[in-house]
Image (cartoon, coloured by chain):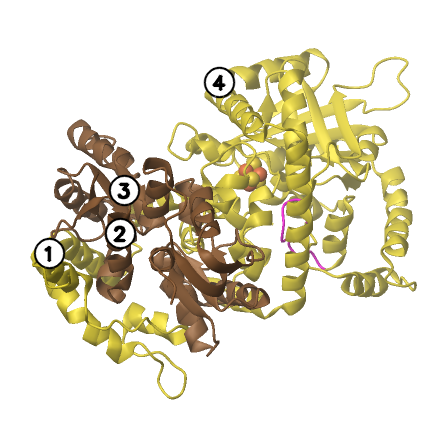
Chain colours: A yellow, B brown
Amino acid sequence: MGVRIGSEKFFDRVDKGINNEFMRKAVVEAQTRLEGRKTKTQEEMGNWEDWRDLSEEIRQHTLDNLDFYLEQFAENVAEQGGHVFFAESAEEANDYITNVVKKKNAKNIIKSKSMVTEEIGMNEALEETGCNVVESDLGEWILQLDDHDPPSHIVVPALHKNKEQIRETFHEKRQYSNSSDPNELALFAREQLRKDFLSAEVGITGCNFAVAESGSVSLVTNEGNARLATTLPETQITVMGMERIVPTWKELDILVSMLCRSAVGQKLTSYITGLTAVKEDGDVDGPEEFHVVIVDNGRSKILGTKYQSALQCIRCAACINVCPVYRHVGGHSYGSIYPGPIGAVLTPLLDGYEDHKELPYASSLCAACTEACPVKIPLHELLVEHRKDIVEKTGKIGFAEKMAMKGYAKAASNPNLYKMGTNMAPSYIKSIAKSEEDGKGKGVGPVKLWTNIRDLPESDGNSFRKWFENRSKGGDQ
Amino acid sequence: MKVSLFLTCLADVVYPASVGQSTVEVLERLGCEVDFPKKQTCCGQPAFNSGFHRESKEVAQHMIKTFEHAEYVVSPSGSCVSMLKEYPHLFADDPDWADRASQLADKSYELTQFIVEVLKVEDVGAELEANVTYHTSCHMTRLLGVRDAPMKLLANVKGLKFTELPNKQQCCGFGGTFSVKMVPISEQMVNEKVEHIEETNADVLIGADLGCLMNIGGRIERQGKPVKVMHIAEVLNSQGS
Ligand code: SF4
């Protein structure tokens, strides 16, 4: 799939999102539910801000010493019979994975949820070699059945679909004939997936956190699918972004707790799976062959820059669940597999400004995301940094805006020019404050954009300055 | 106590004089001597948030000079004060200016914050008969960290019947240039805000930031709704009828 989804223009996507009433209702409900639950579990922790500080510190320390921990992790995996591959690019990762699968003569692959495999387009790469790749996370499975509809949320990928739509998809693709009752739908999915679990030769997972001290990977799910995907198939491949690492189990404990609370408002999810290397003599299940693919794909270019904190992300979606922009436009409007505030920060870093130049501006900088983030990524500040780089480095700013900003700076740093403005403004504002007869705005440029949907206050020309001057002369007393 | 008023460009240029007037009168009633440095302009936030940091610095330098003499800088806007607090970061690689910027940042307060935290007053003796609700602006609460001060002051205004705004923490969709760059999204956000205001049955929406009030009020006017918008300074300056 790659980072980018779809080819529509930004404002067309936004219009589509805004007009999708069902999706918007689903988003509002999900935000209310998830945010409410998060607040509750946060309160249970007592000193949430201290936990955030600690989590930030763990993530920062790990990123500052990433080479050390990655090496330690890789050595520990190898020592216990696993294989580690560092992939610089998506292509390298996919080549390695398809080769492992080929060597095993495998055709059937079962997957648990993983954003990084979406990012590198792994499914497509495997399907091109003739493999049958099945997503086992319920949400991802629904999207896969529905002709690879892209995810609209990083934790709840099918958030934009309702049960009727899901029933329709099941009916059309798998001749499902029961009702749209969520229990019945889930039962059907379970029956269908069970066959795929049993026939899979290779299981592919993502990784919530890799533990450097023991060479283990951990997976956080509510469906238990990751556990099946890692115990039944003979071969396991875990794909992880290079930043997804913790030094020891102690830090894992803290971050998993922060993740579960922030993502779904649970103390812990139903399954937290920790996996270390291959099955040993006497073990009943577990893989005989274990591969870890550590994906860079642009991450090392972020390290050491002002954007490094974006790599602290633990993919909990708390920022998405409080975002007022996401609330109204939905995930697909971002045109990226990573939507919401973290998506607006990360997408241009991973995939460039060319296709994503609007994303940093699709925020009112209300900072709700920054406040929600359990690892304290200053998301709204990073969006401003993007805007700064767009202005200073890309040449993607229109002439009119550049001139307007230069003019603004001149006027706002020169009292005489500014005074001229304040003298002229009231009568101008009066002339454009209300809409035209047809309800459209008056004026030009930004003024028209403003007045298209809003009036302006009617300044009475009795400016504050006159009043203040007058009274200091004794006129007002 | 000597206080220098930073009026903000919106109160200066776009709004009638009453927000500034009320700010001065409330402060004076509480014993402050208020001066108004005439050379003041804008905090620089429009350029800063748009990524034009060079331009923003020009404006910031002018503001730093204009308020260098001040003992305290008080402003009827949480958002603009949070921008003044951003100045030291803006000049991070220029120690001289960073130092002057820090001095300004340290002595700058939003109006309600100043009354409660510095003057230690929670009852300004105001009176206003009205059904009201209050919009907690994002920059004021999240960037400046001022949440309680306006609540404490409003709680002591005689005659106010207060209803909390549902989803009060949600942005109104102003966001400076966001409101004109991303009109379709901003429109949805402000529509939802207006719906919540209507749910409270308030006659007056109070706020402490003219940016938000201009956005919400402008939308309310356009929709022809009967809700009036007041800046908190105007409420605190009300003396009943
Ligand atoms: S940026 Fe923070 S809040 Fe958003 S997904 Fe990442 S960790 Fe969670």
Is residue A120 inside the magenta stretch? Answer: no
Q: Residue at x 41, y 83 (%)?
A: A439
Pair 1/2: label in front: 1
CB-based contact (under 8 Å), mark 1 and mark 2: no
Marks 1 and 2 sit apart, C-alpha to C-alpha, by 33 Å
Determine which residue is flagged by label 3: B84
Report which residue position mark 2 lands on: B47
Specify the amino acid type for callout 3: Leu
Q: Secondary structure at mark 4?
A: loop
Majority SS type along the magenta span: loop
Q: Which residues are magenta?
A: A147-156
Identify residue for label 4.
Answer: A65
Q: CA distance from mark 1 to mark 3?
A: 27 Å
At which x and y percent is residue A158? Answer: 70, 54
- As drawn, is B84 to the left or to the right of A418? right
Residues at discs 3 and 2 both on one chain: yes
Mark 1 packing: few (<14 Cα in 10 Å), some, or many (20+)?
few
Q: Amino acid at mark 4?
A: Asn
Along the line of sight, the residue nearer the viewer: A220 or A37: A37
Q: Residues within 10 Å of mark 3 (few under 14, many from 20)?
A: many
